[in-house]
Image: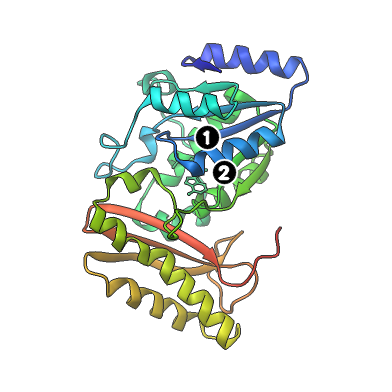
């Protein structure tokens, strides 16, 4: 595996692949790899003939009061993990390599960036859309893999690729969870043992909603499911609900009734410190 840290080299390497007719699969990440990232890498390897993983803690997607400085980083560790997965290039540029001091362009999506996490993190999704656009231009992938863990990010990238006519296939990967149900996340490393146990209430709230739908049928009012989930989470000491919503998994428009594309999405702050997200379909999905 090659570690590449400059724009010139990544353009040269991926350009050579392209010339050789390789099918390039890209996995954008912010590093501090866990099994979720590794599963995306494996999927990417099965979808292309060359795999490139980007590792970049993107400063323009963090708000001024967010955890940019504290975000866990260990290039050596991540490099070894990616190498074991058979990744061909790990592209890990410095912030200055990606953003000149005069940088002033943003890719902005409208309604799809505004609800859910967008409400609490103004500018976040512009930062995501902008960096992903840059990575697409730099690496010219045929296919890019994103996790369903970041439901809004995935919907937004799909929308952007259609809107801006990127000739790139976007593939989602199901959420990878710890055995007890906690969605894997680099930010789980911020949790104390007690907070880690409390954090189980996110996946449990979704599981309870799914059970309610299974028992009562999908005629159960959406507001009741949302209220029950929010109350369940709020009953856990130290948990503050940012949002609980039930939305269409593709458009993110709020559902008025439960169907096979209805996802419960939620964000919770634990002890005012660690913000976690999770989501899940409320009926068995249609596999689209
Ligand atoms: P991050 O490094 O957190 O920006 O994540 C990089 C990619 O991995 C994104 O597409 C995430 O959605 C995906 N990802 C992170 N955690 C998980 C998980 N537990 N299951 C599936 N995908 C994940």
Q: Which residue is mark 2?
A: 146
- Position of 252 with respect to 127 (left or right) is right
* Quarter holding residue 135: top right
| Other residues around mark 2 within 10 Å, as few (<14) / some (14–19) / many (≥20) | many
Work out whether residue 22 or residue 211 is closer to the camera in this orientation and state it.
211
Residue located 48% across and 14% down the image = 6
* Quarter holding residue 237: bottom left
The answer to whether 86 is drawn above or below residue 247 in the figure is above
Residue located 35% across and 27% down the image = 74
The answer to whether 271 is drawn above or below residue 28 in the figure is below
| Mark 1 CB near ligand 1 (8 Å cut) | yes
Q: Earlier in the sequence, mark 1 or mark 2?
A: 1
Work out whether residue 161 or residue 197 is closer to the camera in this orientation and state it.
197
- Position of 201 with respect to 7 (left or right) is left
Residue located 48% across and 29% down the image = 81
| Mark 2 CB near ligand 1 (8 Å cut) | yes
Q: Is residue 135 visible?
A: yes
Q: Percent position (x, y) of residue 213?
A: 55, 81
Q: Which mark is residue 28?
A: 1
- Position of 142 with respect to 109 (left or right) is right
* Tag 2 secondary structure: strand
Q: Are marks 1 and 2 in contact (CB under 8 Å)?
A: yes
Number of callouts? 2
Which image quadrant: the C terminus?
bottom right
Residue located 38% across and 24% down the image = 95
Distance from Cα at disc 1 to Cα at disc 2: 7 Å
Q: Percent position (x, y) of residue 145?
A: 60, 40
Q: Which mark is residue 168?
A: none
Which image quadrant: the N terminus?
top right
Q: Percent position (x, y) of residue 124?
A: 40, 45
Q: Percent position (x, y) of residue 286?
A: 70, 64
């Amino acid at each position: 595996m090659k570690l590449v840290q400059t724009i010139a080299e990544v353009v040269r390497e991926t350009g050579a692949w392209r010339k050789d007719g390789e099918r390039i699969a890209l996995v954008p990440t912010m590093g501090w790899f866990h099994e979720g990232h590794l599963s995306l890498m494996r999927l990417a390897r099965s979808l292309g003939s060359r795999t490139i993983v980007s590792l970049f803690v993107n400063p323009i997607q963090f708000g001024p009061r967010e955890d940019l400085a504290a975000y866990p980083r260990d290039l050596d560790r991540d490099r070894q993990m990616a190498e074991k997965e058979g990744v061909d290039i790990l592209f890990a540029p410095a912030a200055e390599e990606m953003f000149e001091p005069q940088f002033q362009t943003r890719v902005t999506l409208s309604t799809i960036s505004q609800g859910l996490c967008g409400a609490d993190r103004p500018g976040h999704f512009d930062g995501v859309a902008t960096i992903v656009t840059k990575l697409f231009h730099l690496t010219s992938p045929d296919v890019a893999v994103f996790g369903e863990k970041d439901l809004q990010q995935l919907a937004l990238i799909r929308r952007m690729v259609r809107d801006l006519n990127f000739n790139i296939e976007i593939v989602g990967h199901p959420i990878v969870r710890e055995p007890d149900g906690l969605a894997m996340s680099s930010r789980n490393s911020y949790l104390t043992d007690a907070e880690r146990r409390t954090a189980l209430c996110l996946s449990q709230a979704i599981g309870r909603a799914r059970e309610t739908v299974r028992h009562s049928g999908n005629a159960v009012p959406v507001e009741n499911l949302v209220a029950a989930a929010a109350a369940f989470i709020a009953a856990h000491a130290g948990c503050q609900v940012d949002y609980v919503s039930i939305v269409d998994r593709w458009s993110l428009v709020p559902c008025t009734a439960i169907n096979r594309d209805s996802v419960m999405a939620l964000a919770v702050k634990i002890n005012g410190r660690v913000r976690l997200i999770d989501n899940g379909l409320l009926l068995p999905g249609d596999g689209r």
